[in-house]
Image: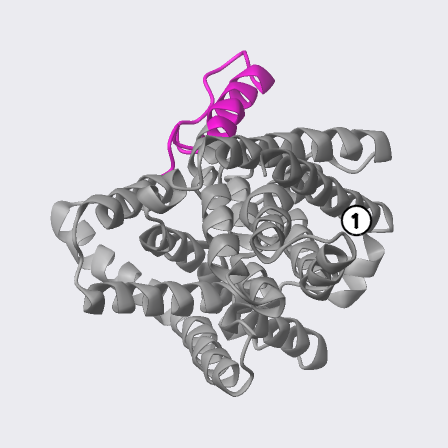
Amino acid sequence: MTHTQFGATEPRERAQLVRSLLPGLVLCLVAAGASYGLSLLLPGVSPLIIAIVLGVLLANVVRMPAAAAAGIDFSAKKLLRVGIVFLGLQLVLTDIRDLGVPILLVVACIVTGGLLGTVLLGRLLRVPPRLSLLIACGFSICGAAAVAGAAGVTDPDDEAEEDTVTAVALVVIFGTLMIPLVPLAANLLGLGGESAGMWAGGAVHEIAQVVATGGIIGGGALTVAVVVKLARVLLLAPVVATLSVRQRRLSRTADPGRQASRAKLPPIVPLFVVGFVAMVLLRSFVPLPEAVLTTGGLLQTGLLAAAMFGLGCGVKIRKLIEVGVKPFVLAALSTLLVAALAYVGIVLAS
């Protein structure tokens, strides 16, 4: 192909790609806007949770147009990663430092123990290893964002997309169940407001679910719950980087006869993780105007809501039932494990 031909073809290919993505992308963005509007009418309910529920309902009630498939898939993968980058603007390192060394050690134990324990339980239950790992990341770190981040490096060719969808669905189901259960259990266990908030931040899966749980507990629980949760979110970067290195080794070991294609190997540190860390550092060391933080928060919410809607559209109730009871048992045990680690750690640290 000549230079002239290449130059003529490339713009056409880009335009064709944009046209293929546009219907589904617009659908996801409209759903994100609708979810945000509904969240204003339903105080305490996150637009992210509304978006994923809307996606599940739409995918299982009506037949999705084929033209929307590419854009929905793009939203579920690419927009989610951009949303994770903007999530970094929520993190201020001094707030996390102010939790103190004992609580930070508890957070590290929650994430490490939750990951290793869930993977081990998955082996005992004979749940597929990749699904076990995705459940472990989602339940131990930060819900659907962690599932997607881990899937991006452990399944770079999207060969096991159903595992990602299943793990996200389980995050939504079990994390939502935790919203009323944690305040009830905290009351029965006699935890004070601050300790109950720390437990919520250490035990509940999604940030949005933590906010809802902290709001129910009341008092100063919400603030401390969010800070503890964000400390867990901060560990997403090293976990994803570790998984990426592991995946590169597995790819080379699986095909020792020839070098694995560089295109199929995940980067050692994925670009969205670099962006996430950069945003954390920016927020922590640069005095950003309130308008910038507000805009960043809106972008994060909008992008993640669009991505959650896209992920929800991939959840087919029939297929979720077909995966069997074992992933649900693993999700329940992982929830109990993370909650127990958080409770014991908070009590000992206090």
The residue positioned 80% from the left and 65% from the top of the image is: 318
Please give left or right for residue 198 compared with residue 98 in the image.
right
Viewer can see residue 157: no
Residue at 83% across, 34% down: 126
Residue for point 55% across, 75% down: 44
Residues rendered magenta in the picture? 242-270
**Amino acid type, residue under disc 1 in the picture:** Ala
Residue 306 located within the stretch drawn in magenta: no
- Quarter of the image with the C terminus is top right
Colour basis: one colour
Q: Is residue 293 left or right of residue 304?
A: left
In the displayed image of the protein, which residue is found farthest to the left? Answer: 4
- Determine the secondary structure under disc 1: helix
Q: Pick the residue in front: 83 or 285.
A: 285
Residue 17 spot, x, y in % from top left? 35, 63
Residue 336 is situated, as x and y percent measured from the top left of the image, at: 76, 45
Residue at 53 percent of width and 40 percent of height = 150
In this image, 94 relative to 253: left or right?
A: left
Label 1 neighbourhood size at 10 Å, few (<14), some (14-19), many (20+)? some
Q: Which residue is mark 1?
A: 332
Could you tell whether 337 is left or right of 126 in the image? left
Q: Residue furthest top?
A: 257
